[in-house]
């Protein structure tokens, strides 16, 4: 089932690329495996998937350890959950990417805690593009300053921006919100930041995200099915 879902999803992504006049292969698929066990990850891996996203640090670290012990060492692990500054160390030690940097303090700790034998941690700055007051993410007008500060940290490599807008009522309004992230991405590059990653789009809105310039979609339920146990901290 997981392998059939992945195939169907790749077809959806290719079709969205076609419709947006974008080359096939210009959008990377991140399989969001939160709440699913290591065996589900292994099944997706057997079908060729190599990049996985986790929201909860402890759960993610356990899966990384289990799968490495099982010999799956070629997986790229992305942390996509909210990050508290007292939980950065395991992220710096076990993950390859972090999409949710929205404060300099978190970025500084990740840089300090990144083990010297590992390559730099790949980082996206999370932006609150639709202005929800309780949402994670830096405000768009603060993104340039944070991005420049993150880019200067020695053990991080700034790759781009990430956003999680509220579900939109229709395709056009979804594109309008994703378009703000795209405009910000271009504005930051015009300021000399060499960003190559725009992390946006999930199971229900990836077509709008791809039409708006996403380079990486984060998809969980369309691959692994409905999630059953609730979020842990
Ligand atoms: C859970 C989650 C996803 C995947 O959501 P689906 O709707 O299952 O595709 C993507 N991004 C983030 C940040 C998530 O927390």
Image (tube, rainbow, N blue to C red):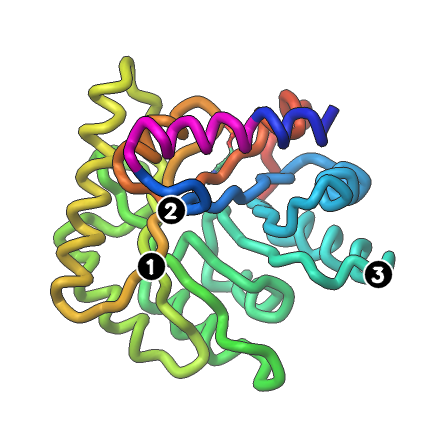
Q: Secondary structure at mark 2?
A: loop
User: Residue at position x 26%, y 73% from top?
Assistant: 149
Does label 3 or label 2 sit earlier along the sequence?
3
Crowd tier of the residue under label 2, counting other residues whose Cα lies within 10 Å: few below 14, some 14–19, many 20 or above: some
Asked if marks 3 and 2 touch (Cβ < 8 Å), the reply is no
**Residue 231: x %, y % from top left:** 59, 34
Decide whether the magenta segment is chiefly helix, strand or loop. Answer: helix
> Alpha carbon of mark 3 to alpha carbon of mark 2: how far?
29 Å
* Dot 2 beta carbon under 8 Å from ligand 1: no
Q: Is residue 38 left or right of residue 193?
A: right
User: Residue at position x 59%, y 80% from top?
Assistant: 115
Q: Which residue is mark 1?
A: 196
Q: Is residue 54 left or right of residue 155?
A: right
> Alpha carbon of mark 3 to alpha carbon of mark 1: how far?
30 Å
Q: Nearer the viewer, mark 3 or mark 2?
A: 2
**Residue 186: x %, y % from top left:** 17, 54
User: Residue at position x 81%, y 55% from top?
Assistant: 66
Above or below — where is 205 with respect to 17? above
Asked if marks 2 and 1 touch (Cβ < 8 Å), the reply is yes
Crowd tier of the residue under label 3, counting other residues whose Cα lies within 10 Å: few below 14, some 14–19, many 20 or above: few
The magenta stretch spans residue 17: yes
Q: Which residue is mark 3?
A: 71
**Residue 68: x %, y % from top left:** 79, 61
Q: Nearer the viewer, residue 185 or 104?
A: 185
Most extreme residue toward the right is 70
User: Residue at position x 26%, y 51% from top?
Assistant: 138
**Residue 35: x %, y % from top left:** 67, 35
First to last magenta residue range: 9-21
| Disc sitting over residue 215 in the figure | 2
Tally of numbered tags: 3
Does label 2 or label 1 sit earlier along the sequence?
1
């Amino acid at each position: 089932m997981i392998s059939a879902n992945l195939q169907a999803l790749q077809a959806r992504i290719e079709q969205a690329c076609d419709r947006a006049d974008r080359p096939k292969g210009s959008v990377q698929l991140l399989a969001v495996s939160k709440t699913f066990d290591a065996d589900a990850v292994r099944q997706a891996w057997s079908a060729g998937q190599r990049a996985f996203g986790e929201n909860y640090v402890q759960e993610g670290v356990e899966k990384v350890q289990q799968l490495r012990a099982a010999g799956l060492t070629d997986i790229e692990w992305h942390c996509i959950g909210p990050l508290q500054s007292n939980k950065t160390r395991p992220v710096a030690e076990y993950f390859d990417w972090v999409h949710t940097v929205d404060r300099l303090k978190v970025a500084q700790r990740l840089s300090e805690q990144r083990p010297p034998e590992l390559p730099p941690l790949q980082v996206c700055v999370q932006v609150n593009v639709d202005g929800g007051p309780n949402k994670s993410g830096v405000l768009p007008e603060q993104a340039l300053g944070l991005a420049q500060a993150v880019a200067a940290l020695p053990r991080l490599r700034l790759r781009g921006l990430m956003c999680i807008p509220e579900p939109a009522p229709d395709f056009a309004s979804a594109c309008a919100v994703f378009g703000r992230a795209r405009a910000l991405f271009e504005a930051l590059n015009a300021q000399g930041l060499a960003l190559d990653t725009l992390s946006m789009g999930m199971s229900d809105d990836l077509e709008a995200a791809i039409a708006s310039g996403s380079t990486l979609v984060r998809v969980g339920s369309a691959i692994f099915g409905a999630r059953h146990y609730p979020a842990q901290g």
